[in-house]
Image: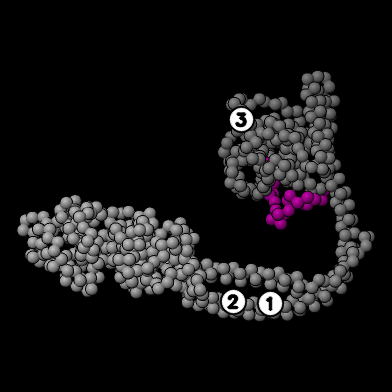
Amino acid sequence: MSAVPTLHPPSRLRFAFLGSFAIALVFILGVFASAIYLAEANVRERDLAERTAAVAKLFATKLDKDGHLLHAVVRALMGDDSLAEAFRRADRAALERQGRNLFETLRSDHRVTHLYFTRPDRVNIYRFHDPPLYGDTITRATMLQAAARKAPVHGLELGPLGTLTLRLVVPWRHAGRDLGFVETGEEVKHLIDEIRDSLGVELLVLVDKKVLPAERWLRGQAMMNRSGEWDRYSTHVALAQTAGTVPDAFDDRALYRLRAGERVEIDDRGRAWQAALVPLADAGEHHIGELVLLRDITTLKSTFNRYMAIVALLCLAVAGAVWGVFWISLKRVESVYQRQHELEHRLLHLDTEHRRILQVEKLSALGTMVGGIAHQLNNPLVGVVNMAELAQRDADDPARVREILGDIRRAGEDCRGFVRRMLEFSKVSCFESKPTPLDTLVADTVTLFRQAEPRHLPVDIRMPEPAPVLVVDPILVRHALFNLLLNAAQATSGVAPITIEIERRKDPASGSTSWAVSVLDRGGGIAAEAMDKLFVPFFTTRSDGTGLGLAVVLHVALLHEGHVTAANRPDGGAQFTFWLPADIEVPTPPAAPMARPVPDAGPAPRVVAHTAGVPR
């Protein structure tokens, strides 16, 4: 009897369990906080995208609307006959006299900053905002499009002095003559102010320095009495903005990230901003800069952070309460576990005694297994003895004696092979498979069975033609089939025939096509209480049985990646089916089956070729 092992006191479950529980709670809170933060960031990002789309749409709408308003102003101006006559004569002094008061009114009341009179050949006659500058040929996109279409054209353009202007060019035809073109315009500063008031965002108009030389920008700043920072951005310069000051953190790096399509959030002097941009194109569809949108999200972020802190504190409070409940509960469990500790120690004594009893039972099972092995060897040896008696009786017939000696030799080789297999099975359960014709294997097994079975029961063999050739271990399969035949004979009363049926059909267990080797008897069937124990080693319903026959059959099937099924037949008797996978079949050309002589120990097995199911 082995010694009783020493039990150590139970570990403190509270620390082991609640430590992991605390880590899990911290992880869950982290995931929860991250999910809320990402959701909030996604909402802010989506809102910014919607505002950016709204800015682009509203900017285009206002440009179109102001373009039509400028057109209405020009149409009213073109109704002045004296102005038309001065334009026709290209009289600059008359244009100044007739149009100066009108221009000043338009500039003060309607924000019109530009008014040009240009000849049909696009040579400028008079600029009201800069009279000394004239005589140049205007090649801007709006002028070229108006001249080509002979219709009014308006659009966004960058002026020669670095002003971003909404321009309208209208061809003027008076009294059947083309006088030239009237061009008017307004700066976009008031447009972005209106968008800021409508959508609650700050806007910054940036123009690419590639399309605006520094000297032109400086002249424009001086003309408009403005001051700006040319060197603030390396690639762009600001022409207009709605905010008094642009955040210092919005620098070249932030602008570069925006133009690369990244989401930009900046912090500047305690304020948080989101930035986005809308590309700016002139009337000729040339990219000239960016309209930058800056949204102040300081209040949103502070509110969100406050709510997150409140939620985190509530979660921690709930987690602490749950942790406390678990602490108290596990303390009680520990006390119960401690009381059970001594009981487990006493149970170990019983476990040691139980192991001793199991050792005794194993020895008993070993003796039973030895009896089963003797049973497996005794069956073919009975056939050998019977065939030896036949050889003695037929000693005068050398051919018959040689045939019986061949059967005796095969039975002896099977016994030797079975012993070798049992030795190998005790180690790795290996087997030797090779292409084996089933008709030969079945015929040899039936011959051995009829020599070993004293009643010499008739055996009907049903298999397709030509007989299949399967890659199996013939010795093990013969033993399995012999056991099934012997089992069927023991269940059969009288001289009712036993049927061996071989066919290729669908396996109900796997759903795939397999080879089914069935043994059918006409006995009393299988009792319901024994159905679940048929293949359990050492289970038997006979007083002289070992309970190893069907267990060996199942083991052989499993070695061949198959299985065994048992069922009662509707017309009486039982059916045992040995399933083998179809992929072990060796393709063979059709050939007529060869008859194999069977020793004259009873009626010959009846071979019937068929491919249908089990006859009923």
Q: Nearer the viewer, residue 198 or 607?
A: 198
Q: Secondary structure at mark 3?
A: loop
Q: Nearer the viewer, residue 535 or 429?
A: 429
Q: Nearer the viewer, residue 109 or 201?
A: 109
User: In the figure, is residue 134 to the left or right of 293?
Assistant: left
Which residue: 39% across, 72% down? 243
Query: Is the magenta region chiefly helix, strand or loop?
Result: loop
The residues tagged by marks 2 and 1 sit, at their Cα atoms, a distance apart of 16 Å
The residues tagged by marks 3 and 1 sit, at their Cα atoms, a distance apart of 69 Å
Q: Which residue is mark 3?
A: 587
Q: Is residue 503 above or below residue 389?
A: below
Specify the label residue 187 is tagged with.
none
- Mark 3: few/some/many CA within 10 Å (<14, 14-19, 20+): few
Part of the protein shown in magenta: 518-545
Q: Which residue is mark 1?
A: 323
Which residue: 87% across, 64% down? 351
